[in-house]
Image (cartoon, rainbow, N blue to C red):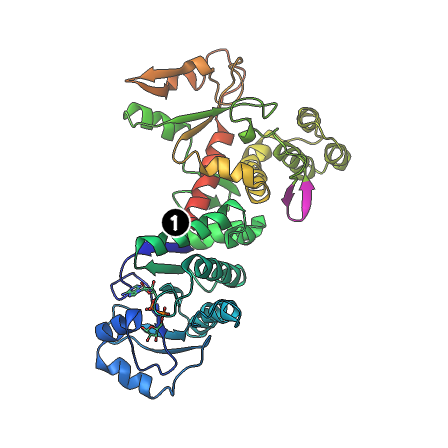
Amino acid sequence: MISLVKGDITKDHNVQAIVNAANQSLLGGGGVDGAIHRAAGPKLLEECRRLNGCTTGNAKITNAYNLPCEHVIHTVGPIWNGGFQGEETLLSKCYENSLKLAVKNHIRTIAFPSISTGVYGYPVEDAARVALHTVNSFLSDHWQEIDEVKWVLFDDRTYQAYQKELDKLRNAGELYINKMLQNSAVAKAYGDAMDLGNLMTIAPHKKRYYSRYDINWLIDEIDLGKKHSYVTFWHENAGYENGIFSQWYHDPGCPIIINGREYLTAEQYMMSEKALLFGDLESYSKIMSEPSPRKCKQLGRGVKNFDQGIWDTAFREILFHGNLGKAQSDIQFLSALLDTEDAVLIEASPYDDIYGAGIEKQDLLTIDGELKVHPKNWHKEGSSKQAENNLGFVLMGIRDLYNDLMR
Ligand code: APR
C-alpha cells in the first residue's frame, strides 16, 4: 500500500523504519537529518560514525534508539544542478536502495521524507514523480514483502505534489495493485492473506464469495434509518445512466483480460465460464465468438448439463472475477466505480421489475429527503425472480478492495 501523510517523520507513524535524507558523511546536518538525530539521541551519531559515510544514491541502516520505530535507513540524495548531472537516476536509486535494504532486513513498513527537495534543491514536482514511480515499480515486484510505503511530508506544497503524482498513477491504472490483482489466483491469495472478512470471505466448502453487502444488510441499513446515497444502473448499453456498470457494457477499445484471455464484456466472461463449468464446449466456443452480450446470455441459458445448485454456488465468484477483470482492464470503469465513493449500487430496471434488484426506479422512495429503496420492493410479488442485486453488491465489494489497497 502507498500512503501519504503530512507531518514530522520523527513522530510515531506506525512503521518499522524511517528513512533519513542524510549527507555523505552521515554525521548529521540540518533539515530532516537534524530532526532525526535530535529525536534519536547521541547513540545514533555514534553508530553512524562507524559506517564510514555513504555515497549519493546509496543507503545504510542503523538502529533507531529513541525514535518510535526500529530502524533508520540513511540515504544520500543528489544535489540539484539543473538536472543534467544524473540527478534523476541518483534520486531513484535512493528509493530503490532504501527499499532493497528494507526487504533484506525483513522490514515491511517504511516511511520516507521527500528526499533532496529541501537543502539539496530538487524541484518538488519532479522529485515526487521520480519517487512515486520508483516505489510503485519496486512494489510491483515486491508487494508480498512490503506492506506499506508511507511518505511523511512536511508542508502543504510538498504534500500536494506527491498527491498529484499518486492520483496520476491511479487514474492511469498503473498503480502496482492492478498488476498484483492481475489474476484471480492473486486476488484469492490477497483475500486469504488479508482476511478481508468484512469484504470477501472465501468459503472453501462452498467456493463462494460472500460480499459483506447483501439484501439483508441493506434492509437492515434502511430499517435502522442509515443514510445512504444510491447509484442505480441498468443493462443493454452505456447510454443508460451509469450503463458502464452493466454486465453488457463494453468499450471495443478496451477488452477485458482475465488470466490472459480477452473478453468483450463481463457477460461473455460469465457465460463462457458457465459453459466450461458444465463441460459444454460447444456452447463455450459459440459464446467466445459471439460479440452480442444479449446473445451470450441466451447461449448461456442453453448450456447443457446445467445444475442450478452448482451454479448457485459458483456464479457469484464468477461474477466477482468477471468484474474484477473489468476493473483491471478498463480504467474508465474503475474510475467511475471509485467515484461512487460509499454510495449503494443497485441494478435497477427503469421499466421492468423482474430483473436486477426487483425494483423499478420509481420504487426508489424518498424517505426524509433521501432516496431510499424500500425493502418491500426487493422481492416483488409476482416477480419471477427473487432479485438479489448481486452485481450491485459485487461491484461494491470490488470498490472496497481497491479502496482498501489504496488507503
Ligand atoms: N519530517 C519530515 N520531513 C521533513 C522534516 C521532518 N521533521 N524536516 C524537514 N523535512 C522535509 C523538508 O521540508 C523537505 O521537504 O524533508 C525534505 C527534505 O529536506 P532536507 O531535510 O533539507 O533534505 P535534502 O533536501 O535531502 O538535503 C539533505 O540537508 O539536512 C541536510 O544533512 C542533510 O546535507 C544534507 C541535506
| Closer to the camera in the image, 236 or 200 | 236
Q: Is residue 297 visible?
A: yes
Q: Which residue is pictured at 40% across the width and 53% down the height?
A: 161
Q: Is residue 66 visible?
A: no
Of the four image quadrants, the one with ligand 1 is bottom left
Whether residue 320 sits left or right of residue 74 in the image: it is right
Which is the main secondary structure of the residues drawn in magenta? Answer: strand
Q: Position of residue 284 (x, y in %)?
A: 73, 36
Q: Is residue 257 magenta?
A: yes
| Closer to the camera in the image, 358 or 13 | 13
Q: Position of residue 322 (x, y in %)?
A: 59, 39
- When the figure is inspected, residue 320 is found, relative to residue 177, above or below; the finding is above
Q: Which residue is mark 1?
A: 407
- When the figure is inspected, residue 292 is found, relative to residue 119, above or below; the finding is above
Residue 6, by quadrant, is: bottom left
For label 1, the SS is loop
Whether residue 60 sits left or right of residue 356 in the image: it is left
Residue 65, by quadrant, is: bottom left
Q: Which residues are magenta?
A: 256-262
| Closer to the camera in the image, 146 or 278 | 146
Residue type beneath disc 1: Arg
Q: Position of residue 334 (x, y in %)?
A: 52, 39
Q: Which residue is pictured at 41% across the width and 47% down the height?
A: 404
| Closer to the camera in the image, 244 or 108 | 244
Q: Which residue is pictured at 68% across the width and 29% down the height?
A: 300
- Categorize mark 1 by other alpha carbons within 10 Å: few (<14), some (14-19), many (20+): few
Q: Position of residue 309 (x, y in %)?
A: 57, 32
Whether residue 331 sits left or right of residue 216 in the image: it is right
